[in-house]
Amino acid sequence: MTGIERLSLNQKTVNRCTTAEAVDGCVRAGIPAIGLWREPVHEIGVRRAATLVRDAGLRVSSLCRGGFFTVEEGPHRRAALDDNRRALDEAAELGAPCLVLVVGGLPEGSRDLPAARERVVEALAELAPYAAERGVRLALEPMHPVYCADRGVVSTLGQAVTAAERFPAAQVGVVVDTFHVWWDPELFPQIARAGTRIASFQVSDWITPLPADVLLGRGMMGDGHVEFAPLRAAVDAAGYHGDIEVEIFNADVWARDPNEVLDTMVARYRATVCG
Amino acid sequence: MTGIERLSLNQKTVNRCTTAEAVDGCVRAGIPAIGLWREPVHEIGVRRAATLVRDAGLRVSSLCRGGFFTVEEGPHRRAALDDNRRALDEAAELGAPCLVLVVGGLPEGSRDLPAARERVVEALAELAPYAAERGVRLALEPMHPVYCADRGVVSTLGQAVTAAERFPAAQVGVVVDTFHVWWDPELFPQIARAGTRIASFQVSDWITPLPADVLLGRGMMGDGHVEFAPLRAAVDAAGYHGDIEVEIFNADVWARDPNEVLDTMVARYRATVCG
């Protein structure tokens, strides 16, 4: 049985907290790892954040996020790739094993989905050697198809694995995020196929009805429709033994007392993911 | 080049109209076919609707909809299957070649997605002989994964084809609805694989941002992110030469003058689907 020793708080789950507060919350709740986001980290500086986390004895499970590189060649694409290099530098300094990539949607005015998808692979090719030098893995995240147009053109785990397989496994892995992939009829065989390509495992629930802002549609485990234990078992069997991040974008969760959220998260994690 | 000769108005696109008004609108706009819905048809009776459509010289491209049979065995399931048999009777009387199936989501309180999906196949097995007797094809519709929990557990064209292939092609086909499947990285190979299993081709656009009610998120062709012509060409190449239904659930479209909607629909169909 998997216990709390693999649990990680993705700091987006306590969106109102500073990085220091999120770190303190993990220590208080006995959560041994944290998934960091660039924006709150930048507020205190990367070096200070790295020190905070290290001094608290926490592991960093991932840095969110890079990506947004589906735009055609030109200054915007160059700026996006430069920003991804900075994100890789930050991930290395923070001790994050991987940089989570939200690849981006269709470029403004474009309907050429195959071309946008091809540019994802081109971006990986450009970034992979840089990531390798820094000892950080690029973690390609398939996103729920509801985001295909405007957020992420990598829509299934199978598609992500196929893209990742063009590169060494140590350089490019994939994210299994239950919210994004739970519906996929090919999910279990694709988790097995992904194997040690799995760089990150994130959990949150699919709730209905979806709120007006679909970006905030994630629920606390147990509040929705996802059966977590078989997914966790499949990811384990595939060879992933790293941290399990709870990442919840949800206005109601964000409005609650963060310590209460962490306590609920630990209890639900034990009941649904470990169970 | 495909012209207006294959265009069909799914009557949901002019949701405020009675069946008689929708039929008149088709005649006025030169649209040769109509996709009917059971509810507005029931308002005037199946026999009267059949006569109206026939006297107007229109083809019926489909009847929407059957399905909603993912619930466990028991009185609810029996009632759902009986209702599907009535829908098949109505489709036969209306001269509809197929009954579109929206299979249903997870049963209340259940998180067992594989079991719900298996019950879809069991329902097809029960209904297929009845459909064959009436000369109506069951048309299994893969729905966008955003609806997996609460509306349709068949989420990809590949999954639909795999389920349909357990039955004779004349009894069980699949629907290709651009709104539901446009994002799928496996779409083009799966359309080719579907071949003459394709029983219905429906078009509407994926728009962003999604409205608060995701059921009303469909746009007029050209208002969103879907590239229609390659999809139409792929469906043609697979061997489907039937009607092409425009089916739009959208509060703004429904609020407009229906004749204006039909004129826009014809123009956009020519520009995006035929183009």
Image (cartoon, coloured by chain):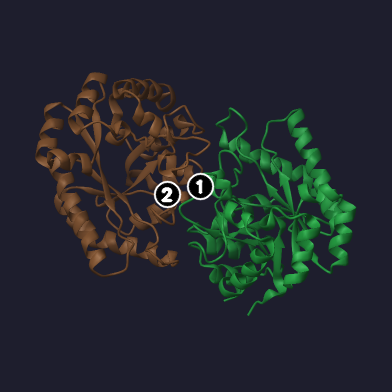
Chain colours: A green, B brown
Q: Name the amino acid, label 1.
A: Glu
Are labels 2 and 1 on one chain?
A: yes
Residue A10 x %, y %: 70, 59
Residue B235 x %, y %: 39, 37
The answer to whether residue A186 is above or below residue B173 is below
- Which residue is the site of mark 1? B186
Q: Which mark is residue B144?
A: none
Badge 1: chain ID: B
The quarter in which the N terminus of chain B is drawn is top left
The answer to whether residue B68 is above or below residue B20 is below
Residue B28 x %, y %: 23, 19
Badge 2: chain ID: B
Occupied quadrant, residue A274: bottom right
Q: Name the amino acid, label 2.
A: Leu
Left or right: A259, with B22 as reference point: right
Q: Nearer the viewer, residue B168 or B94?
A: B94
Residue shown at 51%/59% (left/top)? A186
Residue shown at 56%/67% (left/top)? A231
- Which residue is the site of mark 2? B157
Q: Secondary structure at mark 2?
A: helix
The quarter in which the C terminus of chain B is drawn is top left
Give the mark, 2 or 1, whose residue is nearer the N terminus: 2
Q: Secondary structure at mark 1?
A: loop
Mark 1 surroundings within 10 Å by alpha-carbon count, few (fewer than 14), some (14 through 19), many (20 or more): some
* Labels in figure, total: 2
